[in-house]
Amino acid sequence: MLLTITYREKPATDLGYLLHKHPARPQVFEQSFGKVYVFYPKAEPEECTAAMLLDVNPIDLARGKVGSGFGGLFDYINDRPYAASSFLSTALARVYGSAMSGSCKDRPELAAKPLPLEVHLTNLPCRSETDKLKQIFEPLGYAVSYVEHGLDERFPNWGMSDYVDLTLKGTVRLADLLNHLYVLIPVFDRQKHYWMGEDEVDKLLTHGGDWLKTHPEMRWITRRYFNRKKSYVGSALRQLVSEEEAETGITEEPEADTLVADTGDLDVPPASEQTAEAVAEPIPEKKARRKPLNDQRLDAVVQAVRDCGAASVADLGCGEGQLLRRLLPEMQITRLVGMDVSTVALARAESRLKLERKAELIRNKLTLFQGALTYRDQRLESFDCACVVEVVEHMDPDRLPAFARTVFLHAAPKTVILTTPNRSYNKNYEALTEGKLRHPDHRFEWSKEEFTAWAEAICRDYGYNVRLSWIGETDADGQQPTQMGVFTKCG
Amino acid sequence: MRIEIPEFCLVALVGATSCGKSSFAAKHFKPTEVLSSDFFRGLVSDDENNQECSSAAFDALYYVAKKRLDAMKLTVIDATHLQENARKQVLNMAREQNCHSVAIVFNIPESILRQRNAARPERQLPEHVIRRHCNDLRRCIRGLKKEGFRFVYVLNGVDEVDSAEIVRTKMWNDKREEHGPFDIIGDVHGCCDELTELLAKLGYAPNETGLWKHPEGRKAVFLGDLCDRGPRNTDTLKLVMAMVEGGTALCVPGNHDVKLVKLLLGKKVQRTHGLEKTEEELLAESEEFREKVKTFLDGLVSHYMLDGGKLAVAHAGIKEHYQGRGSMRIRDFCLYGETTGETDEYGLPVRLDWTSEYRGRALVAYGHIPHVEPEILNNTYGIDTGCVFGGKLTALRYPERVLVSVPAKAVYYEPARPLIPEAVETNDDLSLRDVHGRMHVQTRLMPVIDIREAQTAAALEVMSRFAADPHWLIYLPPTMSPCETAEKEDYLEYPDEAFAYYRKNGIATVVCEKKHMGSRCVIVLCRNRETAKQRFGVADGTRGILYTRTGRHFFLDESMEGIVLDRLDRVLTASNFWTDFKTDWVCLDTELMPWSEKAQTLLQRQYAPVGIAGRSGLHQVVAALESACGRNALHFQVDAATSGQNVDLSAVLDDFKYREDCLGRYTDAYRAYCWNVDSPDDLRIAPFHLLAVEGQVFTDRAHVWHMETIRKYMTGIDPVFMATEYRVVDVNDPASVQAGTDWWLALTGSGGEGMVVKPETYTALRDGELLQPAVKCRGREYLRIIYSPEYTKPEHLQRLKKRSLSRKRQLALREFALGVEGLERFVAKDSLYRVHQCAFGVLAFESEPVDPRL
């Protein structure tokens, strides 16, 4: 919310010419999100400090009046008025626009040459990425120092806050300095207050075109600037580097930090399983193309469906329809149901499967509906096969008996194909520290022994036989990431 | 001619064109009862005479017929029905719907038909068509009964048609006018000693003629299987037949009784399963008696609907959509139940369980399957407790729902398989149907609560992903509306408006309870695991639960939950609560503190970051502004300004100083509700409603009773459990109002959240309409953590004062009614699904997008 720039070469007040802001004249600039003040806490020949102060209106924020279209994005209890964010970038471009473009008719020689400058920025949210501060700013010629803040001095056990007060010292052109800040503040903050459009790529190229190309962290900066929005990242990278190199930049594995991002808001439905596991996927040593675990798992399930010869199949907990998409073309299947508890997931499945465009023969065999596996459901009571892929671990253990009754007692299909993670494999995921599970919504993950015991109890209680198998690469301890049980009804 | 038809049946009019079917139907039936093929031809094609659309017209007609029959409405199909195929469709529909089929045939001379046809201006059929119709009719009349029509009436000639009279007779099973009270008695199987003992225990006694009678006019209902296997079969028959004849009992047949009839009719039957014993006894009786038995048993009706349809009795039970109907399928179901066709390890048929899916409103009493203990599930009572196998003979008293048994004096017969023991797992599984789509819940406090499909869909997700075992969730607390927005400047909420709400609604006395700033927590505690299993159907070894307002386990750590429950049990035991209230379980509405216990994530992700960023940022801003204001160089003439961008920096400084102060107050506000919890000793739980115990829901008690009872029984023993401060305010007495207001100012001035103002009684009505059961009035400082740290800035406050409470208040009322209803149902031992629907409804309403700051 406060950005100060200090210049200490005599006459230091020339900073006023460079910024096009008179040191004796405090000014205010009305913006859509609130006000921007520019004033000089110090204006001596030896030292001159220009301050830019953002006054973001919290009530407007909460009511969605700013931050176009995102009524619910900002809450009333919100750090936006106090944090360094994309609002600051916007303010820089609007209020220091001339300085940013390097124009200065009174002191053109000063504008053109590197000057010793010191920047102080309050409350830059950078999570636990303080290492990154140096990696990003040092190559641009700054000495980096920062002060971290605890969340609450009364409760030291709550840990550190995301914010640092950042000080950069360096000899750089003022215009370059402003452009660096313009691009890099949202790279750290990541919550853009506006909807990113195609012109976002132009903005990055305008403000970062020349220096970003040679920055060792170019790809990281680019990805983060667009908040990993692939199409924009690709478009920008293609213009920054050669076509070929750009492609590898886009398909690169997302980093471990996204796991933290995905756990971000507990009220938001968890990201699809695929994302979460892709995140947790160990990064292969070599760039060898390996089939993603999710594909291996779905292949195994489809094969199990074929093997059991089922004509009617219910995918219980179908999510966005990844398995359904694979089962739809199977000629053996004449009736297919996708059930999920999330209506949002079902709507997505419907649009992803593009059913309305499919031939009637295909379209008519699939039905999607909402249901919950802890409730007995007559609609499920006449299927040859039920698939329960990566679902049980999303249930509290004390709800498993109800789940078992719904599926194995009441629905009672001839075959139940069930997959779930193998906890013993988690040590291979770097991002998973001891005891952590692969997805924030996982209530438990079973070891091989635990899964086997559960499966055997199911067989005993409900009259099934089970064949267990394990999917994915085997690690040094003989563990695989996914376990699968194919339950077959006795008699 | 007198045409007798059952009140509920499917009638087919059979006759050639122009034979007078339609005018007959119009004369004898309600217009809505008659579905005419001509009419449906018109509906689907705009032309009543268009024969080409017949197929579509009949599709539509039968669709409507099905809907009517589903609703048990008598239906008449007005079409020629001269083709066997057409009649088959009628019969199939009747069979599918388990209703009787009636054919009324119009046998009119061809000459008359021809005259009528000629007189019809709009549609004249060729003569050969009429001739063909007449031939078809003549050919079919005889075979109608054989085709499957239950009743066939033939009207010969115009006079008979004109003079015919339709009389609707009651269904045989319809005894809804009998209101009891009843004593329903399970399978006797010739155990006459136990039967007389049971009757005596129930208060019956034989009169001078030997007829067993109850002095208060109660009626016994026998569920069949009177004979076979036991020692005194003919005595049993004599006793029961006399009671039925004498009007002191009703009786439905069992499979053994039907087999006995066959034997008596001389049909070939296997003399097994004890029938040989009955036959032997009967052979010792007179021919006349055997004849009487045959007539009696043969005349029994498969099931009865009693007490206005609230009670159904049948030997093997009866599904909801069979009740009150009549067909062979239903008779078989009532006698034998449904089986899978497989046999178990004892060679007995495997039965299909209909009770776990039963959702009917009628209580069903049945016998047939011997259990060790009566089998009670979803409003069904299986009361065959295997007397003849050495178990006991059981009666269900209705409407009391009390079970009375006498033990067997001997094992008269070895069972083929052991009696079914009590289930280890409860099989009261919830069904998706119970909570799917649009729901209507009838409650005591609001007649019908309508819950939309989108709301139930949202609730399904929350319930199934996050909530605890539904057996525990007998109550979800309602949302609470704040008071109207304060008129007083500087305040968003102030006690005046809370008092005014009740004053204007005619409530003189209100109770102001301190609003603890913690998290809502409902506690269910059983004295022991046995109660948890028996009463709540939770058999996983837990004895209670603490859950949040959305039904989630309060503690993710099970051991913490267990410790808190144990401590509460010790408190209740020490205070004699269990004995004083004669209960083995209790349900409490409480606030659990500190807030940080549940809201840790929220605090660390949202509240504390805003606090630290705001305080540190604003501090630096103020320093920079002070420095700028303080320096001498600041002499730019504001009034000489050339643009509107000039600013008075000292005003900006004042503004930011105020804001820095706000952030400090905001931080103090949330800090007051946080402390570290290292052990359960650090928790504080303030119960404020004693919701229910066995047999009682305390929503009929005043709030002061709740406060004082909680203080007496739950506080002062273990510091974790604390009382809630409260004041009683007379809203019509200015001094009392002032005292209440001062109390609130003191509470909120020292970091308190505020208070909850409640009417004196738990539920308060005005002109029969439910009033808000409580309104909250929150403190000025507390609201910083709701409406943003700086909300007290006048320009913000002005905007925030425009808020609407009506939506929130509607929800509060409906959720309150559902919450109370859930408790009432649970205490009345209603089925799990009926209790669950109430909690589910609350959750469904909570999915509504309402301003979360209210």
Image (spheres, rainbow, N blue to C red):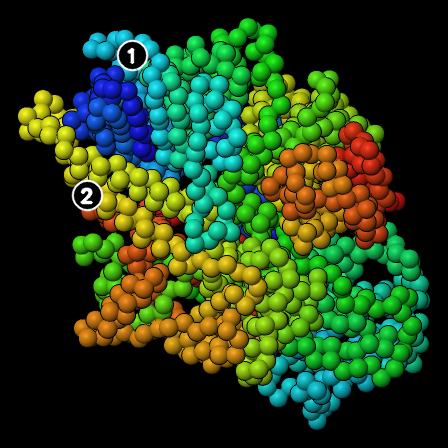
The dot on residue B654 is 2
Identify the residue shown where x is 32% and y is 51%. Answer: B664
- Between B591 and B269, the residue placed more toward the observer is B591
Identify the residue shown where x is 47% and y is 14%. Answer: A212
Q: Amino acid at mark 2?
A: Asp
Q: Which image quadrant: the N terminus of chain B?
A: bottom right
Residue B546 placement: quadrant: bottom right
Identify the residue shown where x is 54% and y is 82%. Answer: B575
Q: Residues within 10 Å of mark 2 (few under 14, many from 20)?
A: some
Residue at which label 1 appears: A111
Q: Chain of mark 2?
A: B
In the displayed structure, would residue A213 be above or below residue A407? above
Q: CA distance from mark 1 to mark 2?
A: 35 Å
Q: Amino acid at mark 1?
A: Ala
Disc 1 is placed on an element classified as helix
Residue B779 placement: quadrant: bottom left
Relative side of B264 to A210, left or right: right
Q: Chain of mark 1?
A: A
Q: Position of residue A147 (x, y in %)?
A: 43, 37
